[in-house]
Image: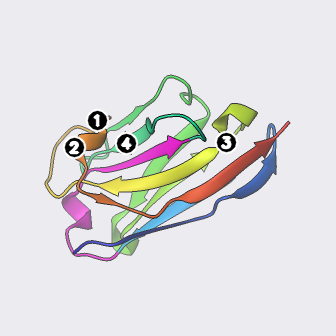
Amino acid sequence: QEQLVESGGGLVQAGGSLRLSCAASGSTFRRAGMGWFRQAPGKEREFVAAIAWTGIRTYADSVKGRFTISRDNAKNTVYLQMNSLKPEDTAVYYCAEQDRATATPTARWYDYNYWGQGTQVTVSS
């Protein structure tokens, strides 16, 4: 069973930056599609960013130009660099992994098979 552990969340002022990390335990990471999602209080979980094993990336419109997803296959880790943070970015951020290789990334939550426990990001105004 694949396990994902997120870290790097915290409290930051608007305009600041944070880098989230997600470490995967299994041997399938190298070929797996990875994604970041977030959920704010009272709202549904929403897509943030995804990266396929090919390195192709996709982003939600709300974070384009501010967030960058990347992966280090040697460390079984995916990152989310978040710059120019806004109060509306406040949410619990979840890392997710597909259990199969796809050449292009997906924004659909139901395409992901494994989920981390989440890390809280709070942006103050």
- Where residue 108 is drawn, which disc sits there? 1
Q: Earlier in the sequence, mark 2 or mark 4?
A: 4
Kindly identify the residue that appears in the image at 80 percent across and 37 percent down: 15
Tag 2 or tag 3, which sits nearer the N-term? 3
Given residues 50 and 4, the one toward you in this image is: 4
Callout 1–callout 2 Cβ contact below 8 Å: yes
Query: Which residue position is annotated with label 4?
Result: 50
Q: Which mark is residue 32?
A: none
**Image-based side of 2 in relation to 68, left or right:** left
Q: Is residue 119 above or below residue 15?
A: below
Asked which quadrant contains residue 120, the reply is bottom right
Q: Of discs 2 and 4, which sits in the foreground?
A: 2
Estimate the x, y position of residue 32 in percent, counting from the top left: 23, 57
Mark 4 or 3, nearer chain start: 4
Label 2 sits on a secondary structure element that is helix
Q: Residue at 52% x, 42% y: name it.
A: 39
Which amino acid is tagged 3? Thr
Which amino acid is tagged 4? Ala
Which residue is the site of mark 3? Answer: 90
- Please name the residue that numbered disc 2 is placed on: 111
